[in-house]
Amino acid sequence: MIDERSTTGRGMAGALSRRLSQSRVLRIARRGADAIASSIERVRAARSQPPKRIRYERFGAIVQLIAPRALVFVDRDYARSIGAAEAPAWHGTEPALGDHPLSAPLEAHLQLTNKCNAGCKGCYTGASPEGSPREYGLVEWKRAIDALADAGVFHVALGGGESAVLPWLGALADHARARGIIPNLTTSGLEGLESLLGIADKLGQINVSLDGLGDAYAAVRGFDGFARADAAIRKLRAIKREIGINVVVTRANFDQLDALFAYAAERRLSEIELLRFKPSGRGARTYDELRCTDAQHRAFLPTILAAAKRHAVRVKVDCSYTPMLAHHAPDRALLAELAVYGCTGGDFLVGAKPGGQLTACSFASPPPALDHERPRVEQLAAYWNAPDAFGAFRTWRDAAEPCASCTYHALCRGGCKVVSSHVTGSLAAPDPECPRVVDHAPRRVHLPLV
Ligand code: SF4
Ligand code: SF4
């Protein structure tokens, strides 16, 4: 089951400690009231909105539920049992989920612009005040939304650059809603806040990037923007419940993870989403400085589970963290049930650059070709079934060791290809930061000098 408030993340349950201080009891009671109000809203939404939508797949179907908001993968028998008619996609033997790419992505990450004045030193897309050449405008992005809706995409994650400054963002969100697509947004909170406050109700989940508290924000981003981001979070949360934070985890803020969960609880945010630092955009230049250490990667899962329990905050982690989860040998069936999949770029998700160039995910580069020859997002349906579509993202089954013999390979798909490409030069190489891959690497023997 995939929670539809997700962008790239997956949810994990939290639990309450038995020994609570009075202030924590009050905070949790407040969040309990939020949860009840949220449930009532969901039930009302379920009554007032059209019922579930079904998208046929070779393995069965994907069912979109309104309450709870979720995408549920069901086999053919189950789909029949809830009234789905026989589908052309069901001709032939029923394959397992993952044997073939889906009929279309579940979500598309649209980088609406590469314009941004913040200048973060690890920006995944190298955004600048000038933006990219030939960026799409409202007309082109509406056309892209139409193509995604026609293909059966369920939601889009809108980002940048800084998309909050785009004067047509509200109109695009309206268009997505009209086509049955939920538009979620990520913003720095540093620009365009007043406009965003005026259109927040048109959007789904809004997450503000917050890569650290106080000085840690500056250590990760290269400037002190914490107070402004915090002010944006407060203002957005005052008018909307679905406000969360995105945290890019680096070696500079890893020790602050518990404090970031406490911050999310204090601000009564709906989620904290943790993203691995990727070597793309300016992040390629600052990767060695900011990427987490091997010890931090191994400690990631227990650290966030403890923080989620301590602060009763809902947490999501992005697709690139699956090797760090697999390191702790969790139950594979449970992971599949919770839709904890690894590198599903070019399958469950796609990205689009500001000029519409289609990519496997928001961190991946477009295919190597002249720009005008690259497929655009509105050509998704034509490109999707091309024999070499998305290259190494679709050939993950041909894995080298230690992925080939890894019992999590069908879920993880070899880890983050953007990291593999940057570190090893090959998209298809096993994720070099996966603990199993680190342990598998030949040991260098240092002989004592005599
Ligand atoms: S390369 Fe794969 S794992 Fe990495 S961010 Fe893209 S989809 Fe996720
Ligand atoms: S060995 Fe490969 S498939 Fe297994 S967890 Fe690591 S990256 Fe993923």
Image (cartoon, helix red, strand yellow):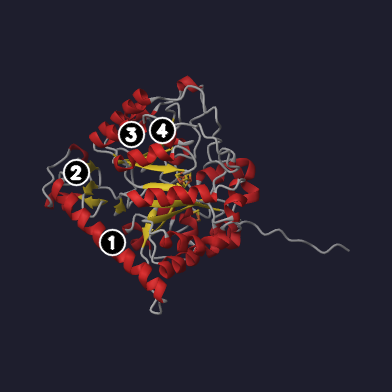
Please name the residue that numbered disc 1 is placed on.
Answer: 35
Q: Is residue 96 above or below residue 154?
A: below
Residue 382 appears in the rendering: no
The disc placed on residue 389 is 4
Closer to viewer: mark 2 or mark 4: 2
Q: Nearer the viewer, mark 1 or mark 4?
A: 1
Q: Which residue is mark 2?
A: 53
Where is residue 402? Give x, y as percent.
53, 55
Distance from the alpha carbon under mark 2 to that under mark 1:
25 Å
What type is the residue that disc 2 sits on? Arg
Q: In this view of the protein, which residue sits in the foreground, 335 or 114?
A: 114
Residue at image location 33% in from the left, 34% down from the top: 170
Find the residue positioned furthest to the right: 450
The kind of secondary structure element at disc 1 is: helix
Badge 3 crowding class, 10 Å Cα cut-off, few under 14, some 14 to 19, many 20 or more, is: some
- Which quadrant would residue 109 be assigned to in this image? top left
Residue behind mark 3: 170
- Comparing 359 with 156, the one in front is 156
- What distance separates the C-alpha of mark 1 from that of mark 4? 42 Å
The reply to whether discs 1 and 4 touch (Cβ–Cβ < 8 Å) is: no
Quarter in which the C terminus is drawn: bottom right
